[in-house]
Image: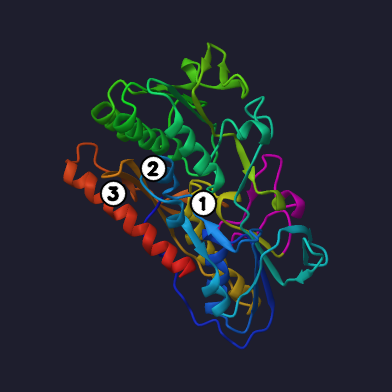
Amino acid sequence: MAAGLTAGLPLPAFARGAAGQVVVVGGGFGGATCARAVKRLEPGLTVTLVEADPAATYTACPFSNEVIAGARGLGEQQFRYDKLAADDIAVCFLPALAVDPQHQVVTVADGRKFPYDRLVLAPGIDFRGGDPPGYGEAAATLMPHAWKAGPQTLLLRRQLQAMPEGGTVVITAPENPYRCPPGPYERASLIAHFLKTNKPRAKLLLLDAKDTFSKQKLFQNAWAALYPGLIEWVSLSQGGKVTAVDAQAMTLATDFATHKADVANVIPSQKAGGIAAIAGVADKTGWCPIDPVTFASTLQPNIHVIGDAAVAGAMPKSAFAANAQAKVCAAAIVASLAGDPAPTAKLINTCYSLVAPDYGISVAGVYHAADGKLLDVEGAGGTSPIDAPPERRAAEAAEAKAWFRAITAEVFG
């Protein structure tokens, strides 16, 4: 949910016939981008991408909310890795089970070991078990999270389609940080569009563990205009934090009330993907602290972390952010292996959200490394105008879809 495909990074000629091995774990927007960028900058390096999906298919999260709302097919979200193999990148479709930082080796599920000079971890997110209390894998079969695109996306769509007219949809939004900060609110918007069109007597309750959220005024103004009386947002201070779920009873409890749902979409609190803890690059928060110039782990040598798993300061967890970070990280790795200092860069992120299929809003930011963190560049970025006319909202929706086509073509095409 972002636009723009550059990280503000110069591309110097690093190629010096260098030899070395770079292993990338995770084949999403961050990992696949990084593998291709490393190989492009230094063709002499051996680059291996380790991706857990045995079907050799990546299912993208951006635009998956449209799939849930019935406006898009899941196949439009799915991409293969053939072009990476054509770029002389070795691709292994097995989970990475172990990382030995001392001997610099990654072990995959069939026992094969991949030595590395530099390792890039792009594992995305995992869920914190039991947060909210009562929620886990079994509960997710009845109250889908759909926060990892694929079967859960389709399950939530089927539940919405089967829900009786006049039913209640409950969505829970977690505390920060989590993947795609505006995502729960885009989802509420597009589900509301589905309900307004197909089940106009239905209601949507959004229980939030926060008092503020990304693009809040833009979303709420749009809800008032497009979905009056349909969406009820309950903030943290109003009792929005879910304290327990009962998937069998389809109930969600807060400190103030217990809510009965016909369809419940529980978005759990999150942490870095599991291999991060195994590799020793996640701290007690569950996320991975990094150097903001190189994305090198501050906890383990010769390991870099990019994308949703990284503690990236002011930069949000988004597909565009992962793509931008991957390019910066790739340049830093190639420079390091050549004995050169890492180039400096400004990173850009622009997250689009759809409030309806023809109504888009966005927020943009520019970030730089300072004081050991990624910080906002003062005066850069911003949000869509609050009073934009319908033509501008429609144009932003078209720009969002153009961005998705462009970034997926760059990463996987």
Magenta stretch: dominant secondary structure: loop
Q: Position of residue 290 (x, y in %)?
A: 62, 54
Q: Please state which of residues 81 and 105 is positioned toward the viewer in this rendering.
A: 81
The CA distance from mark 2 to mark 1 is: 37 Å
Q: Which residue is mark 3?
A: 397
Tell me where residue 141 sits by quadrant. top right
Residue furthest toward the bottom? 17
Q: Position of residue 374 (x, y in %)?
A: 51, 51
SS of the residue at dot 2? loop
Q: Is residue 398 left or right of residue 106?
A: left
Q: Which residues are magenta?
A: 277-301
Q: Which residue is mark 2?
A: 70
Contact check, label 3 and label 2, Cβ < 8 Å: no
Residue type, mark 3 in image: Ala
Residue type, mark 2 in image: Gly
Q: Position of residue 24 (x, y in %)?
A: 64, 65
Asked if residue 154 is among those painted magenta in the image, a careful observer would answer no
Query: Is residue 10 among the parts visible in the rendering?
Result: yes
Q: Is residue 399 above or below residue 406?
A: above
Q: Nearer the viewer, mark 3 or mark 2?
A: 2
If the image is split into quadrants, where does the C terminus sit? bottom left
Q: Please state which of residues 262 and 171 is positioned toward the viewer in this rendering.
A: 262
Q: Which residue is mark 1?
A: 374
Sequence order check, earlier mark of 3 and 2: 2
Q: Position of residue 119 (x, y in %)?
A: 68, 65
